[in-house]
C-alpha cells in the first residue's frame, strides 16, 4: 500500500496548469470545437485563476475547446510544450457569464430539439484545468445534442488534500442542488444526465438526497444519475438511498474491483469498503440492486486511461447514445434497466451470472 501511495505521488508531477485555459488565436483545419459550460464554487483570484479557495457565490463560465483532428476516444491530448491545435487540446475562448446568461444558454434548444444537459461532477485531486478538459473530451466523444456542464467544486488538486476535499464537497452541496433545480426549471427541458466521479459521486448523491428532503421531486424526475468509481462508504450510500428512494431511470453505478485509487481510499478509511469496488458477481449485490432498483455495471474489462484504473469511465462517453437507449435500441441492457451487469471487452453490457435466470431484474 505504501508503494502504491508513492506511485500516486510520483504520477502527480507535471500536471496541467491554468495557463492552458488562456485563449489561443486559432484552431486547426479538421479540429472539432466543443463548448463547455462551468458552474464553480472555486474562488477566482486577482489574476482570473480559479483556485482551491471556496466561494459561496457560484461563478459561471463558457469555454470553447478545440479537439485535434487525430484525437483518440477517451484521451486528452495534452500539450507537451506550447499548445498546438494540430495535435493538442487548446482553449479558443474563455468567457465569464452572469447567472441569467448561463441559464439561457444551457437551456436553449439545440437542432430544434428540447434542450437537455449533461452535468459532470469531478472527483478528488482534480485541478480546474483537468476538469474542464475532461468534460470537453467526454462531450466531444459522446456527440449528443446536450449542453455539457462542469460543476467544479474547490478540490485542492493534490494527493495530500483528501480530507480537505471531503470538506469541500460538503461545502458545495447546496450549490449543486440549486444548479440542478435551475436546469429543471424550463418547462420544455429534456433529460438531465448527472455524472459524479469518485468523491464527486458522494457530492452527487448528497445533492439528490437534499432535493428529496426539500420536496423537489419534480427535479429528481428529470435526472438520470450515474456514479463512476464512486468513493462512497457502502453503508453511507445505503443511508443516502434510504432517503432518495427508487429512481426512474435507475441510478447507475460503474464499478471496478481492481480500482487502485479506491484501494487507497479504503486504506485511509480503515478498510471501509468503497461503493466503486463492489463485486457484481456476489449474489448479495444482485439482491441489493433488485431491492433498491439500481443498476451496477462492472467496467473492469475496459482499458484504463490511468495507472490507477480509476478513470475507465471516460471511454464510455462514445457509447453513451447506445447505453442510454437514445439510438432506438432498447432491447439490450442499458441505463434504463436495473440489475447487476458486466461491460465486456466486446463493448456489450451483459447480465451478471447471478441475475435471476439471466434476465434483467427491476427493469422499467
Image (cartoon, grey):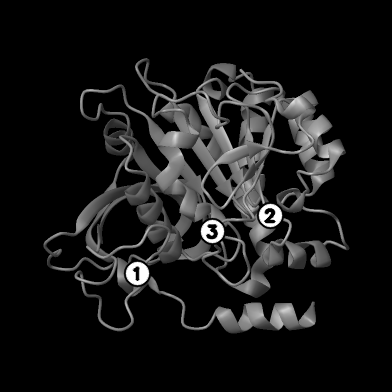
Q: Residue at x 29, y 66 (%)?
A: 89
Q: CA distance from mark 3 to mark 1?
A: 24 Å
> Crowding near pointer 2: few (<14 within 10 Å), some, many (20+)?
many
Expressed as whole percent of the image width and height from the top left, the position of residue 88 reads: 28, 70
Task: Please give the residue where the numbered disc 3 appears in the rendered image.
Answer: 154
> Crowding near pointer 1: few (<14 within 10 Å), some, many (20+)?
some
Q: Residue at x 56, y 60 (%)?
A: 311
Task: Please give the residue where the numbered disc 1 appears in the rendered image.
Answer: 77
The reply to whether residue 36 is in sight is yes
Judged by depth in the image, the label closer to the viewer, 2 or 3, is 2
Task: Please give the residue where the numbered disc 2 appears in the rendered image.
Answer: 256
Q: Residue at x 45, y 50 (%)?
A: 40
Between discs 1 and 2, the one toward the N terminus: 1
Give the quarter of the image for residue 329.
top left
Judged by depth in the image, the label closer to the viewer, 1 or 2, is 2
- Residue 312's label in the rendered image is none
Between discs 2 and 3, the one toward the N terminus: 3
Q: CA distance from mark 2 to mark 3?
A: 26 Å
Q: Is residue 180 left or right of residue 92?
A: right
Expressed as whole percent of the image width and height from the top left, the position of residue 296 reads: 68, 39
Amino acid at each position: 500500500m505504501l508503494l502504491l501511495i508513492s506511485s500516486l505521488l510520483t504520477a502527480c508531477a507535471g500536471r496541467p496548469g491554468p495557463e492552458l485555459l488562456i485563449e489561443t488565436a486559432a484552431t486547426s483545419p479538421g479540429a472539432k470545437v466543443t463548448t463547455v459550460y462551468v458552474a464553480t464554487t472555486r474562488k477566482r483570484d486577482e489574476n482570473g485563476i480559479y483556485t482551491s479557495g471556496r466561494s459561496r457565490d457560484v461563478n459561471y463560465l463558457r469555454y470553447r475547446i478545440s479537439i485535434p483532428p487525430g484525437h483518440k476516444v477517451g484521451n486528452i491530448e495534452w500539450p507537451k510544450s506550447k499548445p498546438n491545435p494540430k495535435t493538442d487540446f487548446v482553449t479558443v475562448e474563455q468567457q465569464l457569464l452572469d447567472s441569467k446568461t448561463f441559464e439561457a444558454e444551457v437551456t436553449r434548444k439545440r437542432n430544434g430539439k428540447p434542450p437537455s444537459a449533461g452535468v459532470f461532477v469531478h472527483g478528488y485531486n482534480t485541478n480546474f484545468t483537468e476538469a474542464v478538459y475532461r468534460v470537453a473530451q467526454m462531450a466531444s466523444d459522446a456527440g449528443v445534442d446536450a449542453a455539457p456542464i462542469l460543476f467544479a467544486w474547490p478540490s485542492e488538486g493534490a494527493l495530500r488534500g483528501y480530507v480537505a476535499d471531503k470538506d469541500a464537497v460538503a461545502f458545495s452541496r447546496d450549490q449543486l442542488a440549486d444548479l440542478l433545480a435551475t436546469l429543471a426549471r424550463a418547462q420544455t427541458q429534456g433529460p438531465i444526465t448527472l455524472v459524479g466521479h469518485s468523491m464527486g459521486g458522494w457530492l452527487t448523491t448528497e445533492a439528490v438526497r437534499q432535493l428529496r428532503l426539500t420536496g423537489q421531486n419534480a427535479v429528481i424526475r428529470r435526472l438520470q444519475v450515474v456514479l463512476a468509481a464512486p468513493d462512497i462508504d457502502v453503508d453511507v450510500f445505503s443511508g443516502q438511498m434510504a432517503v432518495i428512494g427508487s429512481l426512474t431511470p435507475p441510478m447507475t453505478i460503474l464499478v471496478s474491483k481492481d480500482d487502485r485509487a479506491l484501494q487507497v481510499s479504503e486504506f485511509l478509511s480503515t478498510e471501509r469498503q468503497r461503493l466503486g469496488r463492489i463485486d457484481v458477481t456476489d449474489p448479495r449485490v444482485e439482491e441489493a440492486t433488485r431491492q433498491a432498483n439500481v443498476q451496477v455495471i462492472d467496467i473492469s474489462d475496459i482499458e484504463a486511461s490511468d495507472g490507477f484504473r480509476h478513470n475507465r469511465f471516460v471511454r464510455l462517453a462514445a457509447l453513451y447514445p447506445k447505453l442510454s437507449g437514445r439510438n432506438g435500441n432498447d432491447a439490450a441492457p442499458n441505463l434504463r434497466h436495473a440489475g447487476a451487469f458486466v461491460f465486456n471487452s466486446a463493448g456489450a453490457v451483459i447480465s451478471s451470472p447471478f441475475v435471476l435466470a439471466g434476465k434483467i431484474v427491476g427493469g422499467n
